[in-house]
Image (tube, rainbow, N blue to C red):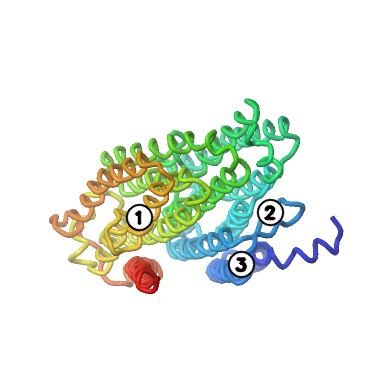
């Protein structure tokens, strides 16, 4: 590829270039100013993330455009996903500022690692060949391993980082082995060329497809590749957990959809059953295991497994009905996830300890009514209570499988949602009706204003998005 051709394609990857240069500048600031630059680097990284997100939307195009000999694809599907990934990553980074300072582990490396992880996610979202998949996944994962073990003086954090690294390396090996099988049997790594051969794919290609799907499913924490999720969520610093639970999952979900729809679209019968099985396992394993949890972070871990099952249902609906439903659902889930972890971070007892036990949430509504309302809003949204945003996300997923004639998946989703309602309602009941078991630190100054502000801001998005979507549907029906 000539220099001239490369220069013509560079404007399409302005979001990625913004993140890379932002990370380089942040490294330089941290290197010269040291630990005292921590806050400045964090706020700079948040601005870089928001700039990259807006650049993604601004440079979105109607017609998909292939870049660098088909390695990347730029389209509206990926551009909107990048915008949401940037927004939730900025929110998660905002949560980390005071948290890391409180523990005296504040260093400018944290926001730099976040920026580099998001670069990997952007590559995953736009990946259009097997090599781009692997590069995006590894760039994201290597940064996330460090973020999981960032509180290295904490035994739980170190253990979480080690588990994540070992299992993540295994999943990356599985993904790479699958990619090598596909390349070996097809002679190409490009999605378009693989698609032209996938309708009559032999056993070797199918095995490769399954291995690649398994590697991506690990990054999503979809069952049966979910084993790492509860321990890593519980042991990692809570801002890192908020990051893990949102942006990387969205990137992996979009990547899996691209791989299935674009590389193996003609072979839909060969992967649809696999995705359907993973969806059902994820929904019910997540829902039933969450019922047994008493730690809020572990409960949210199993909840995320169930929600990845709902996302897999949209993928199983196929390339005609699935993409829009998938994008809407995972976007709403990502926004809700950051908000819920902001609520968890905002709570502490009078002696300064963070509260993560579900029974300890009793009495929040009396001391922190705004936080209680925000938490309730998130829980009702994730449950799927209308007219909040989460209801419309699930509605679109159910509609996609209904239109795709997969009624059994719609029934499974509804049943899993009913089960999940029990543990969400249990938290709401604890927050609003149980007698308090401890004294909470009072006032905005007792915790971080930025953390509480993030929780309230993201909570306000739930009814706003829901009502906006409702109004759009009503207007669309009126003017048909």
Task: Answer few, some or many: residues within 10 Å of disc 3's Cα (few below 14, many 20 plus, some between 14 and 19).
Answer: some
On screen, residue 285 versus residue 20, left or right, reads left
Question: Which of disc 3 and disc 2 is earlier in sequence?
Answer: 3
Mark seen at residue 60:
3
Q: Position of residue 194 (x, y in %)?
A: 68, 40
Task: Answer few, some or many: residues within 10 Å of disc 2's Cα (few below 14, many 20 plus, some between 14 and 19).
Answer: many
In-front residue for pair 227/213? 213
Q: State the residue at coordinates (28%, 42%).
A: 415
Residue 313 shows in this picture: yes
Secondary structure at badge 1 equals helix
Q: Residue 390, located in which quarter of the rendered image?
A: bottom left
Secondary structure at badge 2 equals strand
Q: Residue 419, located in which quarter of the rendered image?
A: top left
Q: Quadrant of the C terminus?
A: bottom left
The residue under label 1 is 395
Mark seen at residue 72:
2
| Distance CA(mark 2)–CA(mark 3) | 14 Å
Q: Position of residue 333 (x, y in %)?
A: 40, 56
Secondary structure at badge 3 equals loop
């Amino acid at each position: 590829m000539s220099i001239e051709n490369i220069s013509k394609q560079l404007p399409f990857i302005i979001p990625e270039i913004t993140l890379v240069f932002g990370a380089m500048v942040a490294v330089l600031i941290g290197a010269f100013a040291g630990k005292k630059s921590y806050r400045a680097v964090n706020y700079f990284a948040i601005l870089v993330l928001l700039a990259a997100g807006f650049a993604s939307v601004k440079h979105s195009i109607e017609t998909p455009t292939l870049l660098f000999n088909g390695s990347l694809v730029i389209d509206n599907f990926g551009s909107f996903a990048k915008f949401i990934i940037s927004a939730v990553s900025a929110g998660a980074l905002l949560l980390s500022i005071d948290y890391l300072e409180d523990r005296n582990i504040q260093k400018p490396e944290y926001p730099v690692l976040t920026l580099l992880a998001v670069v990997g996610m952007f590559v995953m979202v736009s990946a259009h060949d097997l090599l781009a998949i692997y590069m995006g996944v590894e760039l994201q994962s290597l940064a996330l391993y460090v973020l999981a073990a960032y509180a290295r003086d904490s035994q739980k954090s170190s253990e979480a980082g080690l588990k994540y690294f070992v299992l993540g390396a295994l999943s990356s090996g599985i993904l790479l082995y699958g990619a090598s099988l596909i390349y070996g049997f097809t002679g190409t790594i490009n999605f378009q060329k693989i698609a032209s051969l996938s309708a009559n794919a032999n056993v070797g290609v199918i095995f490769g497809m399954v291995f690649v799907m398994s590697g991506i499913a690990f990054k999503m924490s979809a069952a049966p590749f979910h084993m790492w999720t509860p321990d890593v969520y519980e042991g990692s610093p809570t801002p890192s957990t908020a990051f893990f639970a949102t942006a990387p999952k969205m990137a992996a979900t979009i990547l899996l959809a691209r791989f299935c729809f674009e590389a193996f679209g003609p072979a839909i019968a060969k992967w649809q059953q696999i995705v359907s099985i993973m969806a059902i396992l994820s929904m019910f394993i997540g829902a039933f295991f969450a019922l047994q949890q008493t730690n809020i972070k572990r409960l949210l871990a199993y909840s995320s497994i169930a929600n990845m099952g709902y996302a897999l249902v949209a993928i199983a609906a196929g390339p005609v009905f699935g993409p829009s439903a998938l994008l809407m659902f995972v976007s709403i889930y990502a926004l809700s996830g950051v908000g819920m972890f902001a609520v968890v971070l905002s709570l502490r007892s009078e002696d300064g300890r963070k509260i993560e036990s579900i029974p300890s949430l009793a009495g929040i509504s009396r001391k922190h009514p705004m936080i209680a309302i925000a938490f309730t809003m998130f829980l009702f949204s994730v449950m799927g209570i209308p007219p909040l945003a989460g209801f419309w996300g699930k509605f679109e997923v159910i509609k996609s499988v209904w239109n795709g004639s997969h009624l059994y998946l719609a029934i499974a989703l509804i049943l899993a949602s009913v089960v999940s309602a029990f543990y969400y309602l249990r938290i709401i009941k604890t927050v609003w009706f149980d007698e308090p078991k401890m004294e909470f630190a009072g006032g905005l100054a007792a915790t971080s204003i930025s953390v509480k502000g993030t929780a309230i801001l993201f909570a306000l998005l739930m009814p706003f998005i829901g009502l906006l979507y409702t109004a759009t549907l009503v207007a669309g029906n009126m003017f048909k």
